[in-house]
Image: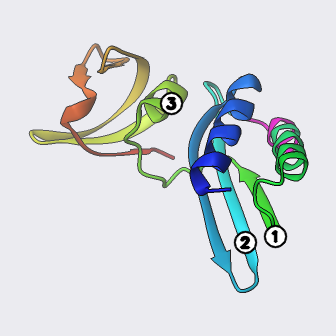
């Protein structure tokens, strides 16, 4: 199976679990392959949710023989310092404090909503997601 086949099944399982797929990476580390998956949701994803989706993904990998060799599965939530840029990043970060850099300024604000490519912040500021040069969750 290819990385795309694995990704397709992972995306489906994560969505069925009510979570958002933030990132996935399948790589070789010595003799073992590692499948690293980052999931989140609006609010925050919990440890039990990560464990539940991990069991479902592991079951699918074994049943469908998606990887075909020894592997390690890592399912977790993204850290605070991770760069934000995708639609799923904006969706999952609603209600969170973000550090945003656009061409004209840098600011910290609470993201209230993301819709149709527009980020709406608590202070009333609305910016296009495409104009964001960098963004991270603020501590």
* Magenta residues, start to end: 45-51
- From the top left corner, tell me how far across and down residue 116 is, in percent: 32, 14
Q: CA distance from mark 2 to mark 1?
A: 8 Å
Query: Secondary structure of the magenta portion, mostly?
Result: helix
Residue 93, label in figure: 3
Against 85, is 3 above or below? below
Residue sitting at x 22%, y 33%: 130
Residue 69, label in figure: 1
Q: CA distance from mark 3 to mark 2?
A: 30 Å
Mark nearer the viewer, 2 or 1: 1
Residue 46, label in figure: none
- From the top left corner, tell me how far across and down residue 51 is, in percent: 87, 44
Element marked by disc 2? strand
- Who comes first in sequence, dot 2 or dot 1? 2
Left or right? Give the position of 88 relative to 30: left
Against 16, is 81 above or below? below
> Can residue 24 be spotted in the picture?
no
- From the top left corner, tell me how far across and down residue 119 is, in percent: 32, 22
Tell me the residue that label 2 is attached to.
33
Residue sitting at x 62%, y 56%: 2
Residue sitting at x 52%, y 23%: 95
Q: CA distance from mark 3 to mark 1?
A: 36 Å
- Who comes first in sequence, dot 3 or dot 1? 1
Q: Quadrant of the N terminus?
A: bottom right
Left or right? Give the position of 11 relative to 103: right
Element marked by disc 3? loop
Q: Is residue 99 magenta?
A: no
Pick the front one: 36 or 107 = 36
């Amino acid at each position: 199976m290819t990385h795309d086949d694995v990704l397709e099944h992972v995306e489906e399982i994560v969505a069925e679990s009510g979570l958002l797929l933030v990132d996935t990476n399948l790589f070789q580390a010595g003799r073992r392959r590692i499948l690293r998956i980052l999931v989140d949701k609006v609010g925050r994803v919990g440890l039990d949710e990560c464990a539940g989706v991990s069991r479902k993904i592991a079951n699918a990998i074994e049943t469908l023989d998606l990887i075909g060799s020894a592997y390690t599965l890592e399912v977790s939530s993204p850290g605070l310092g991770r760069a934000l840029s995708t639609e799923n990043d904006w969706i999952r970060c609603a209600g969170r404090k973000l550090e945003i850099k656009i061409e004209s300024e840098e600011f910290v604000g609470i993201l209230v909503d993301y819709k149709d490519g527009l980020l709406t912040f608590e202070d009333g500021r609305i910016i296009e997601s495409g104009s964001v040069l960098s963004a991270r969750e603020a501590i």
